[in-house]
Image: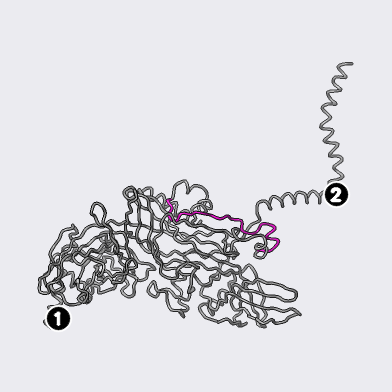
């Protein structure tokens, strides 16, 4: 028992001087405790660690439910038992202490909590060493205060791993004589919230020397010191928006989706460091399974209760009462080939059944064996109804019908993997992504007309629609900037104009204008970061009602299906600025967000303008032809009347001269 107490007290003693250093945060150096600490620091209690310090006064850290006087903050970072000898690093760790005055219930299991650390440095001409790259690391929960101080303090450990940058761990990367840790922020998830909240640290901590027993001389007393300095960060309030083109080079039903975020950057940062050149961000990318939207309330109620979330395989059963399909039919003589690109509960009669002397073959490219998404248009015409971003987001987080494929490796088991495909667009990466996008990396939006001609339109939209111009008419857009500084003159005009020029959702234009005005008042510049262009697909569905005799009756204009790419946990890690060919990296403090666009119906193409003019002229001619038998008897009188009006003045003048002459 005495041995256990000694170990605990020894470990606590090591923390005393460290807390003194970090609390002052003036960059001074202080010698830490001179006792060895041969135990795992993961196991010590957070409140014991704190109260063992002579400089810690718990009365300075009260609860504050209002959040007016006290705010959540990271108030200490501790390095424990580093050794330059690899075989002596079993107890090594970097620890973070969190003050929680609002008594938030922080998630303590899983890996939703993160910390942003510098992983690459560069020495400048003036001998200063600056960070040139940051990465996120997981935080593992160690302990939290209990009893009278429940949830007031939390203790986390940084989970060391090999960096994506150089393949080294934190312990392998640091200089053994002066371990430098540049920490921008931590992100902690409060239970019940969809995303984590970012808390600023903004500190550069340098530990030198070694704890007793961990240096070159195992018998030497502790020489461990720490200095702390401010680390410049930039705090961003990030909003999201999604824009969709009218068509895509991928074909009918496809649109290109541009996913963006917007935020303000302080003007003094831009003046000091120059142009915003690069943005490093991370996210989890997934493609939704087909989302079905219907105006049929009976179908919605019945299927929601009985079939949403249930796998039916590639089978047909009349007892399911409804079918959905998108059919393309090809007729060759008496042979009918029906191709379903999307269908649910449709009879797959491959092999050529005969009916009324005709042969029917059925093929499909996408059979929906499970209805993971089903929405009702709530009385709105299906062609005009969209599922909002907020509604879709709530549905994804609230879905609990099935988890046959487990859960996504994000949000700590909140989101069922059944809602998403196991793949995304070609050339993109499903799941975790981390990119550093340069302002020069422009991209293009290629329209349907870029690679589809007259006969393609006939096959896709029909001969009459093609003749009338009821097909895609939008143009390619080339050289779009991924990082765009928003100017005031770009916000003039109606909503449609602003949305198309900035490539943002019409529903978000007012928000962006409001954010722009806020940025001007706060001496900031508003930027749009267009970080991804992906495929969006939507198609009309035939809704079939199956009666008690198994006979199906189809109704058009009742349903549609769509799917989109979503970006979960999107977070900006750092901004890179360029001035006079000097690049400066500044870490970002911002809350992760989800970028999820609305589900919108298929685009309805109007008759082209030249066809409208031609039809108007034809209508005028037709009216004249139809009215000719009626108005022809009046034409003689009309002509005589016109002649009389023209000649009457001349006749009157002639009579006047005649009388004058007489």
Asked whether the viewer can see residue 105, the reply is no
Residue 425 percent coordinates (x, y):
50, 68
Q: Which residue is mark 1?
A: 4
Quadrant (top left, top right, bottom left, bottom right) of the C terminus: top right
Asked whether the viewer can see residue 439, the reply is yes
Q: CA distance from mark 1 to mark 2?
A: 115 Å
The numbered mark at residue 528 is none
Helix, strand or loop at label 2? It is helix
Residue 85 percent coordinates (x, y):
20, 73
User: Label 2: few (<14), some or many (≥20) within 10 Å?
Assistant: few
Outermost residue, right direction? Answer: 662
Q: Is residue 466 magenta?
A: yes
Q: Which residue is mark 2?
A: 629
Where, by quadrant of the figure, is residue 53 drawn? bottom left
Of callouts 1 and 2, which one flags the residue occurring earlier in the amino acid sequence?
A: 1
Helix, strand or loop at label 1? It is helix
Residue 49 percent coordinates (x, y):
18, 71
User: Label 1: few (<14), some or many (≥20) within 10 Å?
Assistant: few
- Give the extent of the magenta segment: 461-485
């Amino acid at each position: 028992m005495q041995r256990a107490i000694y170990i605990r007290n020894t470990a606590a003693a090591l923390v005393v001087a460290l807390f003194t250093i970090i609390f002052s945060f003036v960059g001074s150096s202080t010698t830490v405790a001179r006792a060895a600490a041969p135990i795992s620091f993961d196991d010590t209690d957070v409140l014991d660690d704190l109260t063992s310090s002579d400089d810690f006064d718990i009365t300075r850290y009260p609860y504050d439910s209002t959040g007016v006087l006290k705010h959540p903050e990271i108030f200490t970072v501790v390095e424990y038992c580093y050794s330059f000898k690899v075989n002596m690093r079993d107890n090594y760790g970097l620890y973070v202490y969190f003050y929680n005055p609002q008594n938030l219930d922080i998630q303590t299991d899983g890996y939703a909590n993160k910390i942003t650390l510098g992983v690459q440095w560069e020495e400048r001409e003036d001998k200063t060493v600056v960070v040139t790259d940051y990465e996120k690391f997981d935080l593992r929960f160690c302990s939290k205060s209990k009893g009278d101080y429940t949830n007031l303090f939390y203790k986390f450990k940084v989970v060391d791993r090999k960096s994506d940058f150089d393949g080294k761990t934190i312990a392998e990367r640091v200089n053994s004589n002066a371990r430098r840790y540049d920490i921008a922020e931590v992100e902690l998830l409060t239970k019940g919230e969809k995303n984590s909240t970012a808390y600023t640290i903004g500190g550069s901590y340098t530990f030198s020397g070694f704890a007793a027993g961990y240096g070159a001389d195992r018998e030497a007393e502790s020489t461990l010191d720490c200095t702390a300095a401010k680390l410049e960060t930039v705090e961003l309030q990030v909003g999201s928006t999604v824009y969709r083109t009218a068509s895509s080079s991928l074909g009918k039903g496809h649109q290109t989706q541009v996913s963006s975020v917007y935020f303000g950057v302080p003007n003094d940062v831009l003046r000091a460091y120059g142009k915003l050149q690069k943005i490093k961000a991370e996210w989890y990318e997934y493609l939704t399974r087909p989302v079905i939207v219907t105006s049929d309330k009976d179908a919605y109620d019945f299927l929601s209760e009985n079939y949403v979330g249930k796998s039916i395989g590639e089978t047909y059963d009349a007892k399911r009462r409804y079918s959905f399909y998108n059919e393309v039919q090809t007729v060759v003589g008496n042979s009918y080939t029906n191709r379903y690109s999307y269908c649910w509960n449709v009879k797959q009669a491959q092999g050529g059944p005969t009916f009324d002397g005709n042969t029917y073959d059925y093929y499909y490219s996408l059979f929906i064996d499970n209805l993971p998404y089903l929405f009702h248009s709530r009385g709105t015409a299906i062609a005009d109804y969209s599922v909002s971003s907020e509604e879709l987001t709530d549905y994804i987080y609230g879905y609990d019908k099935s988890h046959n494929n487990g859960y996504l490796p994000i949000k700590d088991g909140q989101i069922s993997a059944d809602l998403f495909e196991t793949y995304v667009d070609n050339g993109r990466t499903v799941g975790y992504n981390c990119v550093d996008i340069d302002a020069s990396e422009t991209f293009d939006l290629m329209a349907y007309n870029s690679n589809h001609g007259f006969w393609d339109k006939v096959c896709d939209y029909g001969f009459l629609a093609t003749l009338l111009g009821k097909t895609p008419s939008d143009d390619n857009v080339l050289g779009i900037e991924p990082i765009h500084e928003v100017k005031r003159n770009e916000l003039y005009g109606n909503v449609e104009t602003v949305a198309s020029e900035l490539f943002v959702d019409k529903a978000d234009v007012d928000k962006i204008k409001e954010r722009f005005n806020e940025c001007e008042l706060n001496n900031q510049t508003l930027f749009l970061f267009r970080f991804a262009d992906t495929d969006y697909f939507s198609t009309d569905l035939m809704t079939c009602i199956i009666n008690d005799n198994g006979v199906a009756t189809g109704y058009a204009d009742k349903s549609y299906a769509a799917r989109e790419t979503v970006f979960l946990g999107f977070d900006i890690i750092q901004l890179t600025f360029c001035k006079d060919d000097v690049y400066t990296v500044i870490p970002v403090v911002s809350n992760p967000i989800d970028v999820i666009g609305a589900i919108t119906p298929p685009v309805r193409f109007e008759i082209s303008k030249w066809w409208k003019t031609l039809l108007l002229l034809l209508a005028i001619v037709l009216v004249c032809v139809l009215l000719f038998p009626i108005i022809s008897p009046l034409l003689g009188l009309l002509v005589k009347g016109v002649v009389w009006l023209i000649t009457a003045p001349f006749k009157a003048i002639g009579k006047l001269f005649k009388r004058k002459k007489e």
